[in-house]
């Protein structure tokens, strides 16, 4: 049984992520926790001391959030009437956002966080400093980020950008193998360099480790040369039927270039393709 955390701010983007999660895990036995976090910083004074009036304000906001969460549950039951493998729980919390996420991950033994993001003007402007950006960079839990235009389709091809600098154990890649298993999908291991060059001995060793690890799965290696990693990813996604991009958070060389940059024109994977961020 999987435990999935679904943070929601009651926006269209967060509902889109909930829909995606329910479709993605439709054949899996899951506990879903719908979480709304009332920002503590919005409800307390500068020195974080509650007054009696603030207590009443926070309590009122929590009650309102609980009503909205119940509305989402009703919407889920209407749209997914046959989701008998799924159990749903609601959480309304008054806390700092990341602290709340971390607390519930530990208490509920969460396997995956699924959350939405709006990236029409580029992740660098919408994710860095936003809830989603904070989660994928500060919370050590596998996170599936669902952009605003992403709609669930059968997962047939997963792109895995890597520079073959595997500093951590291969166990971090297990969520990818689960996806390949469940969907009979193909893995496209993508290496992008700014100039054409051979792999160094350490990179070659890492490539061989990946070959062994994914031996029983349909996979292939692809080598591209481009001065801008995000352009190479965009071209690869556009020219192939890529349904998901997976990456290791510790692989900062690719992680930051693919998710956090200033270029917004002609980059559509930010808004169309879900990406899976893997943590140890």
Image (cartoon, helix red, strand yellow):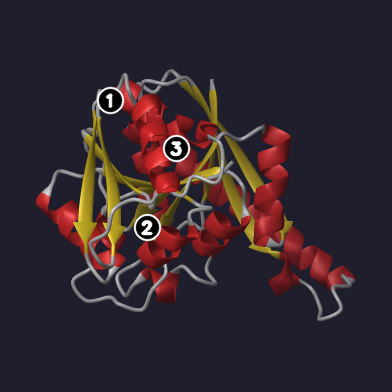
Mark 1 and mark 2: Cα distance apart in space:
27 Å
Q: Which residue is mark 3?
A: 74
Disc on the earlier residue, 1 or 2: 2
User: Eyeballing the image, is 112 above or below 227?
Assistant: above
Q: Is residue 164 left or right of residue 66?
A: left
Counting from the top left corner in percent of width and height, residue 275 is at 37, 49
Q: Residue at x 59, y 41 (%)?
A: 280
Q: Nearer the viewer, mark 3 or mark 2?
A: 2
Q: SS at mark 1?
A: helix
Mark 3 and mark 1: Cα distance apart in space:
29 Å
Question: Is 62 in front, or is 218?
Answer: 218
Q: Residues within 10 Å of mark 3 (few under 14, many from 20)?
A: few
Q: Residue at x 62, y 47 (%)?
A: 140
Question: Is 88 in front, or is 228?
Answer: 228
Disc on the earlier residue, 3 or 2: 2
Q: Residue at x 70, y 60 (%)?
A: 60
Counting from the top left corner in percent of width and height, residue 14 is at 43, 53
Q: Which residue is mark 1?
A: 183
Q: Which residue is mark 2?
A: 12
């Amino acid at each position: 049984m999987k435990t999935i955390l679904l943070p929601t701010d009651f926006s269209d983007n967060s509902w889109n992520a909930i829909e995606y999660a329910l479709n993605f895990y439709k054949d899996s036995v899951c506990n879903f926790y719908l979480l709304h976090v009332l920002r503590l910083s919005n409800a307390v004074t500068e020195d974080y001391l509650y007054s009696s009036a603030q207590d009443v304000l926070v309590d009122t906001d929590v009650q309102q959030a609980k009503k909205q969460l119940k509305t989402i549950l009703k919407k889920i039951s209407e749209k997914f009437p046959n989701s008998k493998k799924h159990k749903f729980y609601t959480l309304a919390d008054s806390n700092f956002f990341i602290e709340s996420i971390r607390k519930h991950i530990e208490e509920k033994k969460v396997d995956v966080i699924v959350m939405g993001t709006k990236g029409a003007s580029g992740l660098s402007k919408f994710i860095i400093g936003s809830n989603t950006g904070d989660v994928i960079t500060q919370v050590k839990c596998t996170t599936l980020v669902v952009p605003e235009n992403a709609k669930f389709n059968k997962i047939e091809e997963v792109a895995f950008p890597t520079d073959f600098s595997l500093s951590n154990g291969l166990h971090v890649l297990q969520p990818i193998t689960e996806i390949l298993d469940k969907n009979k999908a193909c893995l496209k291991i993508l290496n992008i360099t700014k100039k054409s060059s051979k792999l160094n001995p350490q990179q070659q060793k890492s490539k061989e480790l990946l070959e062994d690890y994914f031996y029983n799965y349909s996979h292939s290696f692809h080598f591209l040369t481009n001065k801008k990693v995000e352009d190479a990813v965009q071209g690869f996604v556009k020219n192939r039927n890529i349904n998901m991009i997976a990456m290791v958070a510790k692989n900062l060389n690719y992680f930051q270039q693919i998710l956090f940059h200033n270029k917004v024109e002609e980059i559509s994977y930010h808004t169309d393709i879900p990406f899976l961020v893997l943590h140890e």
